[in-house]
Amino acid sequence: MLGRTANDLFWMARYMERAENMARLLEVGHRLSLLPHEHGLQEWRSTLQSAGCEAGYRARHAELAARHVTDYLLVDRDNPSSVHSCLATARRNARAQRTAITREMWESLNGAWIDFSANAERRRSDDELPALFDWIRERTAQFRGALLNTILRNDSFYFAQLGTFLERADNTARILDVRYYILLPQNELVGGGLDGAQWAAILRAVSAHRSFRWVYRDAFKPWHIADFLILNPQMPRSLRSCYGEVVAALDGLAATYGERPACHAKAVDTLSRVATADMQEIFRTGLHEFLGAFIDATNGLASDIASAYHFDD
């Protein structure tokens, strides 16, 4: 496979995953901003931080306002991580590689972009936002279903998997890092009504609220939430689960091409460190530091994969 094809498939899947993650973050920020407390703007600030978009937002807007944040993360064409930009970039990459993807993948992605862009400029009331967030999640899930159910398990599939799960791992780590870091110093005794809503929001941002309850039947406890989102291999958005998929995709490429570049060993090393980690030790040395190192390792791995498979060629 040409490096340019691998690059387009990787980023097609990564941007579709990012569009879904952006909708999840916005839904959580919207939910929390409606609660009766005095830190509503802080919720939008943490949403921007989790999305990695605070600096870009500050360059565009002098004030922190709910309407500006939602517009910036949903439809701002100058924000490369807005839902509109993610769908547009994913579509552009998919269009360039029409012969490497299936008809169902193209139709689901292209349809999502057409429908979203047709209404991107329309002003929406706060009451309309939850339905829009649901729609974005549904359409990105439709694309993911088309990918999983129609594409051959060849190098096209493996590069798409890498894009999906590196983005998902990065997103889970950022959500947990930003929101945990903000909440814990003020809420070390967990259990209040607002406090419970805040912790529940972390889980809803990664579709883990109900599954968490299946595993932990007691009240929300920060160390249980961290354990669930970092170490639990059964939770499909946990760091361990995501890296399991990353390593599996790299193994597929190794079998396809008959070689293992250095990035394979780096992925295995990160998976091993997460799989053998102990939550007590993570807390002792610092959760923020652990997650920061993980995010750096994930970004480094993405760059190493791009270099090893000649994405720029």
Image (cartoon, rainbow, N blue to C red):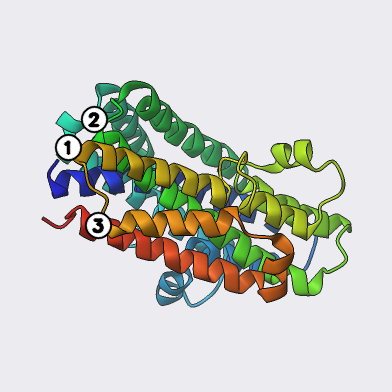
Q: Residue at x 30, y 44 (%)?
A: 12
Left or right, residue 220 beside residue 123: right
Image: 157 above or below 12: above
Q: Please tell me which residue lies in front, 170 or 285.
A: 285
Between disc 3 and disc 1, whose residue precedes?
1
Question: Do residues under tags 3 and 1 come within 8 Å of each other at their CB atoms?
Answer: no
Quarter of the figure with the C terminus: bottom left
Question: Which is closer to the viewer, label 3 or label 2?
Answer: 3
Q: Position of residue 124 (x, y in %)?
A: 51, 46
Left or right, residue 305 beside residue 36: left
Which amino acid type is marked by label 1?
Gln
Question: Do residues under tags 1 and 2 come within 8 Å of each other at their CB atoms?
Answer: yes
Which amino acid type is marked by label 2?
Ile
Q: CA distance from mark 1 to mark 2?
A: 7 Å
Q: Please tell me which residue lies in front, 211 or 85.
A: 211
- Residue under label 1: 97
- Residue under label 3: 306
- Residue under label 2: 101
Left or right, residue 144 beside residue 133: left
Q: Residue at x 49, y 61 (%)?
A: 51
Which amino acid type is marked by label 3?
Ala
Residue 53 seen in the figure: no
Q: Please tell me which residue lies in front, 210 or 241.
A: 241
Quadrant hosting residue 221: bottom right
Q: Please tell me which residue lies in front, 61 or 311.
A: 311
| Secondary structure of the residue carrying numbered label 1 | loop
Q: CA distance from mark 3 to mark 1?
A: 17 Å
Q: Position of residue 183 (x, y in %)?
A: 73, 67
| Secondary structure of the residue carrying numbered label 3 | helix
Between disc 3 and disc 2, whose residue precedes?
2
Q: CA distance from mark 3 to mark 2?
A: 20 Å
Q: Residue at x 25, y 25 (%)?
A: 102
